[in-house]
């Protein structure tokens, strides 16, 4: 076999169960192909992850050189199918956690470059570091249209909203998250012309004042336990549906993998906050000819079904998250009781 290269160092982490591989490549020397990404993210033939984060200095890559005056590091995000991604709300928080853990950054405010532009983050340092909480400014979501988007699963069909959060989403509000089915395959989204490069689909249920629960079929991955940009897209869709508050507002968004907070400023800018943890490190061999289930189009056979959030699962969500951020503890309990 032709090994290119042998023994690549990697780390692994997750944000609310949405897991990622991290490759530290400051000089932009790794020749990472779509097939290589698929192999690394394959849960049987590789390490396994929902996506891959490659850390590169902005001055070392043409993709990010124009942002080097604002950020030192560039997040090269790849979906598990090998396709390039512009933005990943959970992934960028995990990468920020990695930068602090490895000494690349001291904690506190942090700026990272992405294909969707520059993003501002905050990573606790010192005694607060173990809490895992990382925040990222996601910008103002865009509703580019068209207005008549539909999402279909089996015999059921729902109207959906096209929301762009640096990557494209179709957000459908449903009465029962189980109606999304197994999500082993991508839901049908129409018109196809609205999403020429594919789409991440959210099935969302409103369970209380500023409290959403969702399931996600992520573009290039399949069903994932959480999606950071998806949480922001769901909040943008909820605000579009109802009366827009005059001032700042906070949403709680629960997914099968855990809880995220989305704070919306008066100007529409969203800040995503939630846990981000590192779980493993090591080295991996990358073989160009290694057959994987992903490479033969069988990713759905190896991906676990996450299912809809249940009251018991939501009760096990990160209960200290809102309290840690100075939010309404009693309001959170009331929202959970109504789920």
Image (cartoon, rainbow, N blue to C red):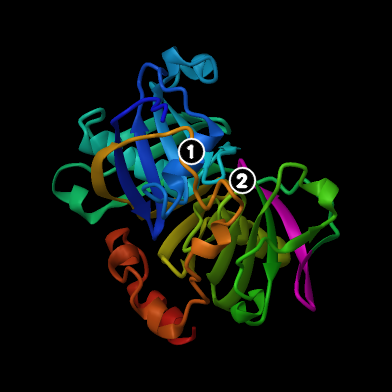
Q: Residue furthest front?
A: 1
N-terminal label among 1 and 2? 1
Residue 159 lies in the magenta-colored region? yes
- State the residue at coordinates (77%, 71%): 158
Q: Is residue 204 visible?
A: yes
Q: Residue furthest left?
A: 127
> Left or right: where does residue 197 sit relative to residue 236?
right
Q: As rendered, which of 18 and 31 lies closer to the eye?
A: 31
Q: Is residue 244 visible?
A: no
- Numbered disc total: 2
What secondary structure is the stretch in magenta mostly built from? strand
- Location of residue 44 in the rendering, given as x and y in whole percent from the top left corner: 41, 55
In the displayed structure, 2 sits above or below 65; it is below
- State the residue at coordinates (42%, 42%): 40
In the displayed structure, 308 sits above or below 185; it is below
State which region is magenta.
151-167
Comparing labels 1 and 2, the label whose residue is closer to the camera: 1
Determine which residue is flagged by label 2. Answer: 165
Determine which residue is flagged by label 1. Answer: 37
- Location of residue 28 in the rendering, given as x and y in whole percent from the top left corner: 42, 18
- Location of residue 209 in the rendering, given as x and y in whole percent from the top left corner: 54, 75
Neighbor class of circle 2 (other Cα within 10 Å; few <14, some 14-19, many 20+) is many
Q: Quadrant of the N terminus?
A: top left
Q: Secondary structure at mark 2?
A: loop
């Amino acid at each position: 076999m032709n090994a290119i290269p042998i023994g690549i160092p990697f780390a692994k982490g997750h944000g609310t169960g949405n897991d990622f591989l991290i490759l530290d490549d400051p000089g932009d020397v790794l020749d990472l192909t779509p097939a290589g990404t698929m192999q690394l993210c394959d849960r049987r033939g590789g390490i396994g992850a929902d996506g891959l984060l490659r850390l590169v200095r902005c001055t070392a890559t043409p993709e990010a050189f124009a942002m080097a005056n604002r950020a030192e590091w560039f997040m090269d995000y790849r979906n598990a199918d090998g396709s390039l991604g512009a933005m990943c709300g959970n992934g960028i928080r995990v990468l920020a956690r990695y930068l602090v853990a490895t000494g690349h950054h001291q904690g506190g405010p942090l700026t990272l470059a992405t294909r969707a532009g520059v993003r501002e983050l905050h990573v606790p340092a010192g005694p607060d570091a173990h809490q895992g909480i990382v925040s990222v400014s996601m910008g103002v979501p865009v509703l580019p249209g068209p207005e008549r988007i539909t999402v279909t699963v089996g015999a059921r069909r729902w109207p959906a909203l096209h929301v762009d959060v640096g990557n494209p989403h179709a957000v459908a509000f449903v009465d029962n998250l189980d109606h999304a089915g197994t999500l082993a395959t991508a839901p049908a989204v129409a018109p196809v012309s609205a999403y020429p490069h594919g789409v991440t689909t959210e099935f969302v249920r409103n369970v209380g004042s500023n409290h959403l629960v969702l399931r996600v079929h992520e573009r290039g991955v399949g069903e994932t336990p959480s999606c950071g940009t998806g949480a922001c897209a769901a909040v943008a869709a909820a605000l579009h549906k109802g009366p827009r508050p005059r001032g700042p507002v906070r949403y709680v968004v629960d997914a099968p993998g855990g809880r995220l907070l989305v704070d919306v400023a008066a100007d529409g800018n969203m800040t995503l906050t939630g846990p981000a943890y590192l779980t493993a490190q090591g080295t991996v061999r990358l073989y160009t000819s290694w057959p994987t289930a992903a490479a033969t189009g069988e990713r759905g056979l190896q991906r676990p079904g996450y299912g809809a959030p249940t009251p018991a699962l939501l009760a096990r969500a990160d209960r200290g998250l809102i309290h840690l951020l100075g939010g309404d503890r009693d309001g959170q309990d009331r929202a959970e009781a109504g789920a």
